[in-house]
Image (cartoon, grey):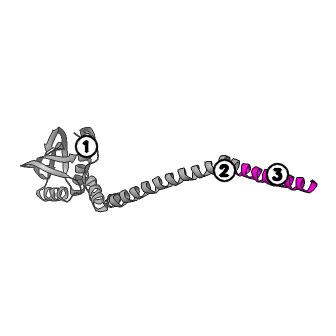
Amino acid sequence: MGRASNRIHRKRRYVLALGLIGAALLSWWAQFYDPLSDRMNDQDVTIAKLKLENELLEHRIDRLAPYADPPTNEIGQLREWQNLLIPGRVLEEVNPAIQTTIQEIADREGVSIKSYKDLPVGQWKDYSLARIEVQIETTTENLAKFLEAIDHLKRLVQVEKMTVSYRKTKGFDLQVTMQVSALFPGG
C-alpha cells in the first residue's frame, strides 16, 4: 500500500499543482490581462477617432489652403493706396499735413503763400475730404509749375476751386485763391 498511496499522493500533488497553476492563470487573467486588453481596446477606439478627426482636419486644410496665403498683389496695392493718403486720422492732423505739402511745393516752385484757411470737411462718395484755402502770389510761369507739381504729387491731393486775379505787386503778376482738398480715412 505504500506504493499505491504514494501514487495517490503524487496524483494529488500533480492535481493540486495544476489547480494552483490554473488558479494563478485565472488570477493573472483577472488582475492583469483583462484590464490591459480593455485598455488596449479603448486606446484602439481613441486612435480610430483621432485618425478620423485628423482626416477631417486635413480635408478642411486642403479646402481652406487657397485662402491661407495672403493675396500679395491686393496687399501691395492697398499699401500703395495707403501711401497716397495724407497722414492723419482726424481733420486737425490732416489739414496741417496738407499745408506742409503745399508749402514744400511752393518753396520749390517759387510761389509766395500769403495765408491758409481751414475749411469744413467735405465729402466725396463715402469718404471725407480735408479742405483748406490757400492764397498765393506768383507769376504765370510759377503758377503753372506749382499746379503741375500738385498734379504729379504722389498723394491724393487736388485743387477743387481756383480764382486768379491779375495784379502787379512786388514782382508777382497773379494773386490766386485756391481750395485744396485731400482724402483721409477719418470722418
Give the residue type that dot 1 points to: Val
Q: Which residue is mark 3?
A: 12
Question: Dot 1, how many residues are within 10 Å of its Cα: few (below 14), some (14-19), or many (20+)?
Answer: many
| Residue 83 part of the magenta-drawn span | no
Q: Mark 1 falls on what kind of element?
A: helix
Which residue in the rendered view is the most extreme toward the right? 2
In-image side of 167 versus 94 (left or right): left
**Which segment is the magenta one?**
1-25
Q: Position of residue 73 (x, y in %)?
A: 28, 62
Q: Is residue 58 above or below residue 32?
A: below
In-image side of 23 versus 121 (left or right): right
The answer to the question of whether label 1 and label 3 lie on touching residues, with beta carbons closer than 8 A, is no
Give whichever of discs 1 and 3 has the lower sequence position.
3
Q: Is residue 25 visible?
A: yes
The answer to the question of whether label 2 and label 1 lie on touching residues, with beta carbons closer than 8 A, is no
Q: Position of residue 88 (x, y in %)?
A: 28, 44
Dividing the picture into quarters, in which one does residue 74 lie? Answer: bottom left
Q: Which residue is mark 1?
A: 94
